[in-house]
Image (tube, rainbow, N blue to C red):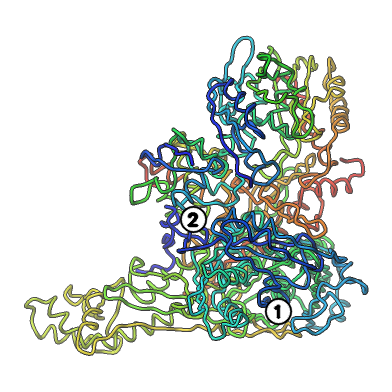
Amino acid sequence: MSWVGRPLPRPDAAAKATGRAEYIGDLRRRGMLHGKILFSEHAHARIAHIDTTRAQRVPGVRAIVTGFDTPELRFGFLGDNRALKRDKVRQFRDEVAAVAATDPDAAAEAVSLIDVTYEPLPAVFDIPSAQRPDAPLVHETDGRGRPVSTNRLPLEYHHRSGDLDAAKRDSRWVVEGTFSTPLIQQSCMGTAGCIAELDPSGNLTMWAKTQIPFLAQRDFNRALAAMGLKGRNSRVIVPTLGGAFGTGLDTHAYEYIAILLAWRSGCPVRMLYTREEEFACLSPRQSATTRIAMGCDAEGHLTFREVHVLQDNGAYASWGATFPTVMLLPATSLYRVRAVRFDADLVYTNNTYCQAMRGYGNPEVTWAIESGLDELAEEAGIDRLELRRRNCTQPGDHTPMGLEIRSCGLAECLDRTARSLRWGEARPARRGIGLASLIHVGGSGRIYRSDGSGVNLRFDDYGNVYVASGGVEMGQGLHAALTSAVADSVGVLPDQVFVVPTDTSTCPWDVGTHASRGAFVACNAAIAAAASLRAQLFALLPEVLEGELKRNLAGAPDDELAAVLDAARAPDGLDLRDGVVTIVGCDQDWARVALGRTLRALHFRSGGTMLAAHAFYEPPSELPDWNTGMGNLSATYAFGTQGAEVEVDVDTGEVKVLKLVAVHDVGRVLNPTTLAGQCHGALAQGLGYTLYEEVRTHQGRVLNPSFRDYKIPTIHELGFEVDLQFVTTDDDRGPFGAKGVGEPGLVPTAPAIANAIYDAVGVRIRDLPITPQKVLDALAMLRPTGP
Amino acid sequence: MRPYSYHRPTTLAEARQLHGELAGARYVAGATDLLVAIKSGRTEPAALVSLRGVAGLDRIELTPDGAVLGATTRIADLATHAALRAAYPELAQACAALGTEQVRNQATLGGNLANASPCADTAPPLLVNEARARIAGDAGTRELPLADLFEGPGAVRLAPGEILTAIVVPPPVEGWSGRQSKARRVQVDVSLASVAVRACISEGRCRGVRIAAGAVAPVPLRLAATEALLRDQSLSGALLAEVRASAAAEVRPITDLRATERYRRHIVGVFVERCLRALAEEAGCPV
Amino acid sequence: MPRLSFTLNGASARAEARDCDTLLDLLREGLGMTGTKEGCGKGECGACTVLVDDRPVNACLFPAPEVEGLAVRTIEGLADGGLSPVQQAFVDQGGIQCGFCSPGMILSATALLERNPDPDDAAIRTALAGNLCRCTGYAQIVASVQAAASALQGGTP
């Protein structure tokens, strides 16, 4: 029986359905205090003085910390951020002070009584102002204290491949345009938070809403060292997460502040953001402005692509500042293109700083490429689908940035999407169709020195397998995938597989659950660990098998037993399936032994043994060269095409989606239920990105920090037909042939819809979200007498 | 959030007495707006006097003389009341489009109106029915046209301690029917603009019409100039284009996070035209 | 603090609450019943949905003192030990991912199916529009409600 590919319920589903799953806000520690942060009231200002005397008098207050009375805890990808600000604040949400109190109301009241004197500084809120030679500097020094002279981030993203000049000369048709995407919020239903607890020796236990428990352990250990607790250790426990979508890719100031408050008060401290704090004080996805030029020859072969991306990074750098490494994927490798020039500039401003979100730079650039391709097709007089088919990426391709394409189902994704949209058929006025494709990492994405993932497997006395993985379950279904993979590769029933909670003290290292890598790397590690576990079992089994079979036999002839034992000792003579040990070629009932019995026999004997195995999977990939962007950063790549059919109301400007098609090359289906869940969920986020979502700011302040005015799709907005299909390409590096699928589902949704809008009413919207007002304005440009 | 005391009177007299005695008291019914305002720090009442338990305030009475809709009637009950829907379809539609199932189960008609939000969903359909507000105060019960209740954003013309107890809606008149439309970003949304139209259309002529709009002025308002354009006129494409422009010109919207002034004007015009077209079609004379 | 008497998951309950507490505070802090989640505290996400006299409401906007004499049902009370048919359908159909919206979503679905055992697609979407979910795209949630309806009517989901 194979469990991979079957719609097994996720192992945590029942606990979640009954309200028993414990999220950060549900956990209680004895003596736990509630933390609250005072955020800056200025976008850019010197902190002249902080007076906490009134706050200290609030009953229940146990600790107050500021940047002036605590050790400096630096963090962030470039080391440019500090837990509590001391010299100056650089954004509205900067952390200025914090309180721990016995109840949340007291903490909030105390925070409101902290008096801060600021000396406001000139600030920059957009890229052009930040780039002016005389612009005020957001950071006067870099992470190492060296003076800087501009607001440009010290990160270079420049890629050149092919002969650009020649490719341009060969271009019969050329289009160019500027496409923009807004700040959007990940909008996890469970808000950010943590609990920090220090033991009397100064070792930290941190319950964290994180996707990177092991990198967080490193970060927190550095913080302990800076606090004078050098050599003390951090244990990071990941409770049930109310979604993550990239928000857990960095450590956050609130986590360090919880540590400081726990240290200062001697009590465990919980920090839990309100929804308003989640919107205003947690980092959203970066906005991006992408200028693109591209061409094709007379036959419609793509000649070149020039891409320049500008990103407002906000006041500090998170891992999100490495988005351009992933932007290079679509820029160089979405369809075949001869020559590519790619540049990205990231600029510090006094806006809220940004971080990762699902798709990691890919949707921003795919938005520009796939919108532009429709324009190029029209310019060249070639059918939009045909242009894409003619340039389709194929297995075996070696792309301009050095990606080695192994399995690739893009051609089939295009064809199936077109079929589902009834491509070429006439449709009523104001209805249109469009499509767009994607390439994404499908076999992890190397952005760190190790891209590995460890799995430990351990048998108990009853035939159960305990799986300890460094990967994080955040709702995407990693534990469901691991359960099926372990059941199949060890040979037990899914009910005998228990994935243990993620905890750095019990689970092996993993770089982090990002880049759609969770199932790919963890299942590959599990397969290797399972092979080792089975090998150990089969090597030892002959020592106890005779005794177990005799218990089964009850008087069967000795010669038959001897033959069976001989068969068991033959190479590959043993098998384990669904929790039962069998002997190859022997189908007698008595020649089958339950796994638990054999394990107890191995355990409870002289020189007894317990069986466990470890594997660490390091994907065969390259860390991209930071200067050229070149490198095969993933073990394999995911592809897909999405299509949209829309109807545009030209009176109201509203876009009604009638149907979305999503055809994804997933390698192989590990679990159809969780896979469909990932794709539907990503599609809904893609829909929100396209039509509704935008964090609005004015001079650095977030104006819509609530679901009342930050609109994510409700169940109504998804009330149209979704045709979700999977193309199976059985990737030779994927676990059971599977590729990563977590992010791809939202990458091409926006251009598919925008292309359909153009098809319907002839207007091209180049900046997301596509609001009714933008559609009306564009229609008015078409018809000068219109609304 | 400043702590407040909470009181649950069972009679109007008791409620008014508590309100008079407690400094900084506010009436509360469904609490779906007020608790949000309190949690956001926009208001800090010292005491809340709940009208939920006051007997007789939550009734829907349909009589030949019209409808009496108790102030603490829940929006969900108005949205699903079959006879009410038949008599005043635009009101039922507006109630069904207000908030979420959870909010409709808690929010009340009186609360929606007495909060005096310019975007109160129930106001335009009640304005086009020339509904009256019934108010209990020192001098007993008084009534005033609903349109006169609204003073400005968040402000109503109620004397201290007065309680909005019911909305009285005149009975539907044979030949008249109603429609409403609400502009929103996603299904669950604060109204960006809303329109209600009640009209009597026969043989292609508009015999009578009342038009109201919400979220496009400091208070929900009737569009008198636009109504005047229509009265006793034959409905034609040309007239509807004029009506559309008139409605857009007559409202006084602002630009905020949710929509621009331009969009609000435009959409009000579109909605007025669409409601009229739907009513004309219903009357058997599509334009 | 006032002592409140009400029915909680079918049993009579007494609890103390401050006047300014919400039903959500009463459940989570007062009674330690953390199955009801707080997603926004402003009635916009539906994570705190509970049933009061069989109707879904946002517990975060429901004044605790108003619970006196009413019947409250929470996620903890839907089944004795096992899973209710609605919970089972959400488990089987993939209606749950991160799970934070699930208790509220399941209660909204339960209330819907109690008053409308055979809801069409539009009725399902109207009933659940007040429960935001960021993970699923809702497709498998609709499928879960349909499967639950069919299971409750004795059919095979």
Mark linked to residue A79: 1
Q: Is residue A290 left or right of residue C80?
A: right
In this view, A154 is above or below B53:
below
Whether residues under marks 1 and 2 lie with C-beta atoms below 8 angstroms apart, the answer is no
Q: Amino acid at mark 1?
A: Gly
* Residue A48 occupies quadrant: bottom right
Q: Which label is found at residue B145?
A: none
What percent of the width, then of the height, locates residue A609?
27, 86
B111 left or right of A696?
Answer: left
Q: Quadrant of the C terminus of chain A?
A: top right
Label 2 marks a residue whose chain is C
The quadrant of the rendering that contains the N terminus of chain A is bottom left
The residue that mark 2 highlights is: C96
Residue B172 seen anywhere in this rendered image of the structure: no
For residue A139, above or below residue B282: below
Q: Are marks 1 and 2 on the same chain?
A: no
Count residues near mark 1 (Cα–Cα under 10 Å), then give few for <14, some for 14-19, many for 20+. some
The residue depicted at 71 percent of the width and 29 percent of the height is B180
Q: Is residue A652 above or below residue C30?
A: above
Inter-mark Cα distance, 1 to 2: 38 Å
**Picture residue at 69% right of the left edge, 12% below the top:** B173
Name the image quarter holding residue C151: top left
Q: Residue furthest top?
A: B64
* Residue A431 x, y percent position in the rendering: 73, 46
Amino acid at dot 2: Ile
Front residue of B169/A734: it is B169
On screen, residue B259 versus residue B94, left or right, reads: right
Q: Residue at x 80, y 16 (%)?
A: B205
List x then y, in percent, for residue C35: 46, 52
Secondary structure found at label 1: loop
Indicate the chain on which mark 1 is placed.
A
